[in-house]
Image: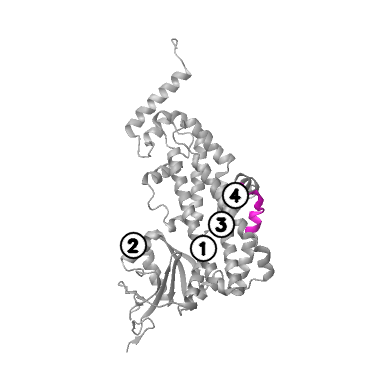
Amino acid sequence: MDEQTPAGGIHAEGQSELTVVVEPEGVLVAGDPTAVEGYLNKLRFNAANAVEVAGIDAQTTAGTAALASGLAAVGAQHGTFVRLAPDSVEKLRKFHVLPGQPGFNRMTVVDAAGKFRGQMQWQSASLVGTRALSIQLAMATLALQTAIAETTTAVERVEGKVDQILNLAQASMIGDVIGHHQALRRTVLMLDESGQLPTADWDSLAPLGPGLEVVVERLRAHIRKSIDGFDASRPVQERASYLQKAVEDNRLGESLELLVIAEDSLYLWQRLRIERVKHTEPEHLELVVASARKMLADHLAADGELLLRGRAELARYAAIKPLEIVRWMSNAQLKRDVLQLRQDLDSFAKARRSQVQGWQDHEDPTVGDALTELGTRFKSVGETALELGSRGLDAGAAGLGFLGKRFTRVAEAREASKRNPGPCD
């Protein structure tokens, strides 16, 4: 005989219930392990590359406390945290793979034969009071924990250059950013492992928060200013000079890496702040959690805009005008700088999980085409101008084609004439 589920649905023998909590930062999937895994497979199938299971479940040390509190709030023992691109969320809702409304939802997902159901009927369930706050706390903590993919490469690259970068960003008063990051990581790891945040540890780290916010904003402003200085209308030699200054003097790539480290430090600090308030000033916890979630949303918006602007400007800046081909190919430094900055932007995108955030979903396709071309066609600085012309690049990266070859021959002839003037010249 069927029994009534807490959500008001029918729970038949052999069936498993799945709980899904949808929040702006991601999705908490909870329930029977088989049901959870089956649902995750369906998400991956429907959302392709725009879904990322954050690697946090009830069995991992990192995030156990945050996830456990979230699972307890929905009455489950097993679950995981998933990030989805915003466009994928809408698509999954349209096809009923994800609940149509944010919040706490349940459904029966496995039939008596143990197979995952294709048709999903979600039922909203009430989540109020302390249970609602527990979910918000869990989602905020998990989002902070997974906002940055990894910082090891960034730390290795900027070591020994931090002071110079901070001077450029007018944030030299902040101090040892790398040291602060290491101290925050150690303390958060101890919190994850022990569930304890000693007062002495918090007191030593509490003053770092405001300074880290200043570093993040000033680094972002420095990067934005460097990108805004790109002027695609300048002659190729001037573009080469400015790009070299941006890469070597303004440390544009290293600034992007340091921004990732500073943001990760700030997110680690926010996790400690939330934990401290939870135990010492619980009446303020909801406000603190809300402020952390808003900060994450603001950073995502600002970093997405920064990445897309950088990619667009680089694509325009590096475009080859027909009569510039020979000058371009003779400037090895320009090609190296273009490729370096493209790699720096790619590294920043990877660290900030841009694919899952869907930042590039609506980017002008010609930008992606141009940057792909930069990555695959300009690796050899010994390519001839004729080869480049025949491969078809123009200002929009759409193709010089046949005309490209003609322009190349004209440009080469003019350059040869300048080098070897005739008797009448």
- Residue 14, by quadrant, is bottom left
Residue 121 as seen in the image, left or right of residue 174? left
Label of residue 157 in the image:
4
Q: Is residue 387 above or below residue 178?
A: above
Q: Nearer the viewer, mark 3 or mark 4?
A: 3
Alpha carbons under labels 2 and 3: distance apart: 30 Å
Residue topped by disc 2: 91
Above or below, 193 against 174 in this view is below
Q: Earlier in the sequence, mark 3 or mark 1?
A: 1
Using a 10 Å C-alpha cutoff, classify the residue at mark 4 as few (fewer than 14 neighbours), some (14 to 19) or many (20 or more). some
Of marks 1 and 4, the one in the foreground: 1
Q: Residue 132 in the image: state x and y as whole percent.
A: 47, 75
Q: Residue at x 60, y 74 (%)?
A: 279
Q: Amino acid at mark 3?
A: Glu
Give the main secondary structure, helix, strand or loop, of the magenta stretch. Answer: helix
Q: Which residues are magenta?
A: 170-181
Q: Disc 4 residue type?
A: Arg
Residue 402 placement, left or right of 301? left
Kindly identify the amino acid type of the residue bearing the numbered disc 1: Thr
Q: Is residue 176 magenta?
A: yes
Q: Is residue 280 left or right of residue 303?
A: right
Name the image quarter holding the N terminus: bottom left
Question: Is residue 374 among what the camera can see?
Answer: no
Q: Where does the image place residue 374, in percent across and percent down from the top left?
A: 44, 41
Q: Disc 1 vs disc 2: Cβ atoms closer than 8 Å?
A: no
Q: Residue at x 40, y 46 (%)?
A: 368
- Residue carrying label 3: 263
Badge 3: few (under 14), some or many (20 or more) residues near its Cα, within 10 Å? many
The earlier-in-sequence mark between 2 and 4 is 2
**Mark 2, mark 4: which one is toward the viewer?**
2
Query: Alpha carbon of mark 1 to alpha carbon of mark 4: how far?
Result: 21 Å
| Residue toward you, 416 or 366 | 366
